[in-house]
């Protein structure tokens, strides 16, 4: 390898790395900093990468900036957990509160493609009622978008990512066919299925964003099992290998290793561009519209760090809600040992799941959860056995020898939005001289009731398949949403249904930050669907001269 | 204790389709990690060696995994995790302070540096640290429980299980690109995976493991 993507930008001079061919390049449009582009987008993950593609394809001039490197997976990704921590956002952050959130690895990416480069690829639709959870279910807040419209965009994203899924999905209204067939099940998934059948609930093959048939230059998933540390074969349909190449082909420019520090706002309350750090200097990209897509910590951090004399509390913050209602998801697990060899390291980690408790409302708490089969690799598993199970010394060494018999079930559970859970700025500065994020989190009683319910149920599911040495992992969380809430009232939301700031009309937000509620499924499909919708809304507004 | 996967060595797959060039490069670098400290002082490093011996005690019948050197390497490169508690300093400072405080606690409770104590006394101190019961002034505001759970334990555990020897001992398949796996079901093993001893037949497992490639 001739260059180091972690230190030297790859995008520029009219070319970008070809993610499908080692050492190769593709042409890329080049804009000057003084060119006033239609859109500058901060972040190129599930939100920003998708939006960059769709806006460029709609004919807008687009520059996407990402703080992370631009990898070619085929040449840059090793089969090694430690090496692949280079995919994570490991800049300093303070995490505090009654239930501090673990950041860095499973929920924060720093690369072109964002966290989708290391996501677990689980691609689920929201239950329709969740878009009006306040009205229909009595908790949280309503989304200002209609579920049927969202379902059309879900179909678009499922097609764009060639999601491999079951022939028929057991829950919710009918949905179109998944583009690719479901993957075969590994033993970990078979164990989940057996448990569900024993307890009389439905399960399904997980709709998942890794190829079950060839696509272009990528061959089907080879079941190497390193999904959450980066796919070295391009079977994973991350933004890096789907939306970003499409964006380039449509004329967008993406700049890697470009950290945005501040959004500039004019006297007339218009965003005029962004200050970004690249190649050891601060630069300024002019733009007619600015989109923030840095995920639920970096997005509010940037808005807060962009405070001016006119906006002393940060941009887009007349509601006072920027950074508030941070909503993660419960990620508790139950683990045990099977007499049979499971070898859960083979294949994508979550090949089977049940959404039973997302659709059954006979519960003593609000919200729901799904649970999935698991396949932790050695470092992750040893860390779980030590920090969550409390093992060290001989007990740890003995427990690790049972690795191939380990079987686990893990939830993605809905936590409720609370204003006290929030992102603020700390006094400490990062390597760019910018105040770092301080993240505060506490579980509410409803969160605790949901977690307790899930642990009881998953314990029964493992008992039903005769697992032994069963134990509960009670402390984990995943995904980051909700700090720039969308809504239909400027007093109780930061952006409107078009993900457009109420205060600064040419400023948009496009990532999980806008979620008013998080549901009991992984958010990436919804983030991408919402980005597609936002792109269409922007085109419609532009056509009417209302942009 | 008898080995579960006799004769199995992940490194035997180094030149098979399970390892690509970038993986070989990364693992080679890890195996060549300098055994002498480059960030910690010799004294701090000696304490860390003793701590790692208790957290991840190693078999004596094979070359040791250089756990302390791998932790020191992480500190030397100043790799962060992406978050820390409000009362926890960054990794480098946490380790320096924590190791010094542990030695202070050892001298106070047992009259010698941590590495000079017998294993029972060492385990007792680590257990008290895990419970947050160590409160010497040398901790300087860093809760001993936080240091144990958020710094000491994860860093040592990540170091140990980053090493191919650890992978071989647990019967993990190891690196798997471009060749992944084919047999996915219960009790199914590809010929390039570890075989566990079944029904006490060590020879059969050994024979299979020597053919892994």
Image (cartoon, coloured by chain):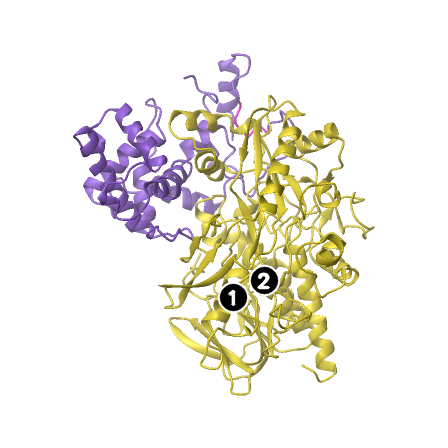
Q: Is residue A367 above or below residue B145?
A: below
Q: At 22% across and 44% down in the image, what residue appears?
A: B137
Return the chain for callout 1. A
Classed neighbour count for the residue bearing mark 2: other residues with Cα under 10 Å, few (<14), some (14–19), many (≥20): many
Q: Which chain is purple?
A: B
Circle 2 sits on which residue?
Answer: A513
Q: Nearer the viewer, residue A395 or A483?
A: A483
Label 1 vs 2, first from the N-terminus: 1
Q: Are marks 1 and 2 on the same chain?
A: yes
Extreme residue toward the top, this view: B200
Judged left or right of residue B129, residue A211 is: right
Residue B192 lies in the magenta stretch? yes
Farthest-out residue, right:
A174
- Specify the farthest residue to the bottom: A267
Task: Note whether A51 is above or below A178 in the view shown.
Answer: below
Secondary structure at badge 1 equals: helix
Report the quarter where the C terminus of chain A lies. Answer: bottom right
Q: Say whether marks 1 and 2 touch (CB < 8 Å).
A: yes
- Left or right: A374, with B52 as reference point: right
Residue A254 part of the magenta-drawn span: no
Q: Which residues are magenta?
A: B190-195
**Which chain is rendered yellow in the image?**
A
Q: Report the Cα–Cα distance between label 1 and label 2.
A: 8 Å
Q: Residues within 10 Å of mark 1 (few under 14, many from 20)?
A: many
Number of labels in the image equals: 2
On the image, the x and y values in percent for residue A436 come to 41, 63
Residue pictured at 40% horizontal, 57% vertical: A92
Q: Which residue is mark 1?
A: A300
Q: What residue is rendered at 39% in x and 43% in y?
A: B150
């Amino acid at each position: 390898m001739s260059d180091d993507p972690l230190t030297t930008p790859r995008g520029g001079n009219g070319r970008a790395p070809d993610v499908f061919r080692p050492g190769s390049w593709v042409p890329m449009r080049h804009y000057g900093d003084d060119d006033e582009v239609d859109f500058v987008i901060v972040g190129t993950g599930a939100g920003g990468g998708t939006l960059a593609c769709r806006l460029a394809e709609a004919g807008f001039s687009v520059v996407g900036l990402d703080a992370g490197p631009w990898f070619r997976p085929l040449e840059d990704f090793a089969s090694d957990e430690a090496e692949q921590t280079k995919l994570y956002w490991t800049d300093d952050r303070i995490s505090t509160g009654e239930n501090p959130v673990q950041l860095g690895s499973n929920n924060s990416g720093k690369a072109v493609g964002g966290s989708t480069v290391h996501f677990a690829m689980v691609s689920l639709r929201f239950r329709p009622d969740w878009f009006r959870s306040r009205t229909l279910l009595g908790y949280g807040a309503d989304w200002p978008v209609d579920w049927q419209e969202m379902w059309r965009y879900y179909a678009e994203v499922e097609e764009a990512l060639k999601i491999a899924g079951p022939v028929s999905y057991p829950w919710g209204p009918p949905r179109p066919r998944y583009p690719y067939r479901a993957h075969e099940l590994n033993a970990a998934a078979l164990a989940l299925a057996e448990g569900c059948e024993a307890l009389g609930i439905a399960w399904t093959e997980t709709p998942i964003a890794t190829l079950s048939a060839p696509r272009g230059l990528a061959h089907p998933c080879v079941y190497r099992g390193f999904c959450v540390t980066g796919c070295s074969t391009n079977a994973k349909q991350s933004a890096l290998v789907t939306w970003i190449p499409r964006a380039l082909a449509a004329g967008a420019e993406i700049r890697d290793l470009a950290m945005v520090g501040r959004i500039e706002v004019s006297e007339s309350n218009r965003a005029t561009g962004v200050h970004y750090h690249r190649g050891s200097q601060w630069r300024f990209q002019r733009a007619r519209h600015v989109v923030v897509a840095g995920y639920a910590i970096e997005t509010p951090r940037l808005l807060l760090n962009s405070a001016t004399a006119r906006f002393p509390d940060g941009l887009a913050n007349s509601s006072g809600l920027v950074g508030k209602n941070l909503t993660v998801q419960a990620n508790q697990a139950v683990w045990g040992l099977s007499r049979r060899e499971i070898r859960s390291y083979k294949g994508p980690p979550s090949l089977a799941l049940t959404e039973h408790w997302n659709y059954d409302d006979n519960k003593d708490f609000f919200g729901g959860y799904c649970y999935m089969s698991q396949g932790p690799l050695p470092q992750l598993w040893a860390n779980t056995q030590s920090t969550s199970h409390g093992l060290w010394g001989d007990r740890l060494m003995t427990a690790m020898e049972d690795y191939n018999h380990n079987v686990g079930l893990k939830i993605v559970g809905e936590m409720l939005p609370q204003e006290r859970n929030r992102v603020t700025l700390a006094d400490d500065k990062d390597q760019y001289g910018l105040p770092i994020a301080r993240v505060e989190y506490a579980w509410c009683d409803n969160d605790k009731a949901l977690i307790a319910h899930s642990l009881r149920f998953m314990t029964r599911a493992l008992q039903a398949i005769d697992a032994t040495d069963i134990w509960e992992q009670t402390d984990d969380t995943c995904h980051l949403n909700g700090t720039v809430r969308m809504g239909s009232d400027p007093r109780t939301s930061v952006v409107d249904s078009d993900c457009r700031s109420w205060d600064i009309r040419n400023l948009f937000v496009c990532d999980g930050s806008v979620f008013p509620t998080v549901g009991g499924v992984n958010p990436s499909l919804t983030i991408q669907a919402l980005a597609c919708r936002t792109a269409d809304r922007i085109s419609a507004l532009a056509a009417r001269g209302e942009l | 204790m008898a080995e579960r996967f006799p004769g199995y060595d992940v490194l035997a797959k180094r030149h098979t389709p399970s390892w690509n060039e970038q993986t070989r490069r990364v693992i080679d670098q890890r195996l060549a990690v300098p055994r002498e400290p480059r960030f910690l002082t010799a004294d701090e490093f000696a304490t860390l060696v003793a701590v790692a011996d208790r957290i991840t005690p190693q078999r004596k019948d094979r070359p040791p995994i250089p756990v302390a050197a791998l932790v020191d390497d992480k500190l030397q490169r100043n790799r962060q995790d992406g978050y820390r508690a409000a009362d926890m300093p960054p990794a480098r400072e946490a380790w320096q302070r924590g190791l010094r405080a542990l030695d202070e606690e050892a001298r106070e409770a047992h009259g010698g540096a941590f590495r000079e104590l017998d294993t029972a006394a060492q385990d007792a101190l680590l257990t008290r640290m895990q419970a947050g019961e160590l409160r010497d002034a040398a901790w300087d505001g860093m809760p001993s429980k936080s240091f144990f759970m958020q710094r000491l334990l994860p860093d040592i555990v990540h170091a140990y299980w980053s090493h191919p020897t650890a992978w071989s001992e647990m019967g993990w398949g190891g690196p798997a690109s471009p060749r992944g796996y084919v047999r996915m079901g219960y009790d199914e093993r590809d010929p390039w995976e570890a075989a566990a001893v079944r029904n006490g037949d060590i020879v059969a497992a050994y024979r299979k493991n020597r053919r892994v490639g």
